Image: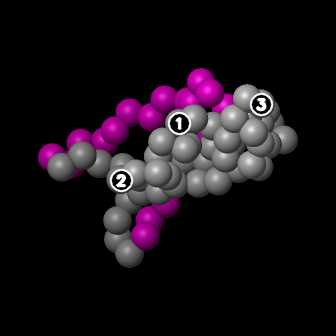
Amino acid sequence: MADDSTPSVNLSAPVGSVDLGALDDEGNPYEIWPCHDCLPWHAEVILVEGVVLVREWHAVDCPQFRDLVKN
């Protein structure tokens, strides 16, 4: 991982993913907005054991990704 003063968030940065629920508690879909902190961000919809999830991909140095994986 790059040092905190020079995070690597360009298109060639290493990426990681996190799986998030696609629906809230009432069954409503979440809106998905692109990450403004990293260029390699993208999302895909996956089905895991009958549950619809959104897999978000971020640069591993992205502050949004770090917040998601530390929780």
Q: Residue at x 55, y 30 (%)?
A: 34
Between disc 2 and disc 1, the foreground one is 1
How far apart, in angstroms, are the residues tagged by discs 2 and 1?
16 Å
Question: Disc 3 versus disc 2: distance between alpha carbons?
Answer: 31 Å
Secondary structure of the residue carrying numbered label 3:
loop
Q: Nearer the viewer, residue 39 or 28?
A: 39
Which residue range is magenta in the image? 26-48
Q: Which mark is residue 21?
A: 2
Q: Is residue 46 magenta?
A: yes
Q: Which residue occupies the extreme bottom position in the image?
A: 49
Q: Amino acid at mark 3?
A: Thr
- Amino acid of disc 2: Gly
Marks 3 and 1 sit apart, C-alpha to C-alpha, by 15 Å
Main secondary-structure element of the magenta-colored stretch: loop
Name the residue carrying label 3: 6
Where 40 sits versus 17, above or below? above
Q: Secondary structure at mark 1?
A: helix
9 to the left or right of 29 = right
Q: Quadrant of residue 8?
A: top right
Q: Earlier in the sequence, mark 3 or mark 1?
A: 3
**As shown in the figure, which amino acid type bears the numbered disc 1?**
Gln
